[in-house]
Image (cartoon, helix red, strand yellow):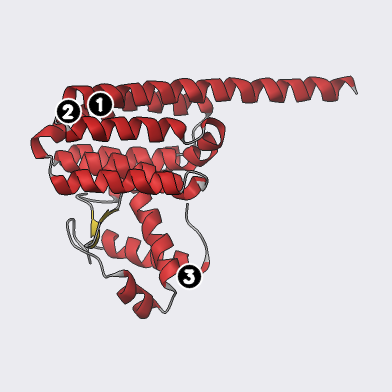
Amino acid sequence: MRTSGASQKVYDYVYEGIKTGTWQPGDKIPSEHELSANLQVSRVSVRKALDQLVGIGLLLKRQGSGAYVTQIATLDALDAMMPVIQMNDMEVIKLLEYRIGFETTNVELLQANITQQLIEQLEKCLEMMRLYRNDQERFYIHDYQFHQIIAEGTGNPFVIRISQLLTEMLKNHFLKLNLKIGPEIGLEYHEKIIEAIKENDFIIAAHYMKRHMLVTIEAVKNAQVAETTIIQSNSTSQSKK
């Protein structure tokens, strides 16, 4: 999701600052105003770059507070995964299947650390997903952040790192996938998960997360079949001409 120009300048500056240790896990990075002034770019460019860094799990935005470096010990593991990010359709399905147990367990682990602030962060993500339901790139930035907030909330550094790696591996595919399956599944199940968490019913919340993953996989499979059918049909039509 990298872009060019001013946003790329901000992205690279913050990314390198995290990678070299200028900002440590848990540190608050400079505000949008400070980054805009220091790098001589617009606030819009800063915001877009920070949203991208949130989307890959390196930053976490806290409403009314700013952006913080997530609890990741090193970016070496993230960099090491880069060669395998380009996946075929079957590999995407397999990775989504892995997420069933991973995301469900994260919700269960969250129970020990749940706070009102964390609930408000999840609600804010859902609000932004609703706002950008017709803007695929922005929609999935907040979709990623929803799952990353849950991972961060577990307080488990291994969970946090794995979540970041999964996000990085899937982010190049989800924009295309969302065009096929639409935003409705994410909106429906994220709302149900939040409501169950607010009622302190983490068994139900975990159930909804599992259903979220299963329904998403089924929708992706159906979309892939439909796409293959169209391609074969077009190929047949061309061969007859």
Q: Secondary structure at mark 1?
A: helix
Q: Position of residue 25 (x, y in %)?
A: 18, 56
Q: Secondary structure at mark 2?
A: helix
- Whether residue 7 can be seen here: yes
> Residue beneath label 1, please?
104
> Residue beneath label 2, please?
108
Q: Amino acid at mark 1?
A: Thr
Q: Amino acid at mark 2?
A: Glu
> Residue 212 is drawn in which quadrant?
top left
Q: Give me the C-alpha separation between circle 2 and circle 1.
A: 7 Å
Classify 10 Å Cα crowding around label 3: few (below 14), some (14-19), many (20 and above). some
Determine contact: label 2, label 1, CB under 8 Å.
yes
Task: Point out the tag, 2 or 3, that comes first from the N-terminus.
Answer: 3
Classify 10 Å Cα crowding around label 2: few (below 14), some (14-19), many (20 and above). some
> Residue 59 is drawn in which quadrant?
bottom left
> Residue beneath label 3, please?
6
Nearer mark to the viewer, of 1 and 3? 1
Q: Which residue is at the front of the view, 80 or 38?
A: 38
Q: Residue at x 23, y 39 (%)?
A: 150
Classify 10 Å Cα crowding around label 1: few (below 14), some (14-19), many (20 and above). many
> Residue 236 is drawn in which quadrant?
top right
Q: Position of residue 65 (x, y in %)?
A: 21, 62
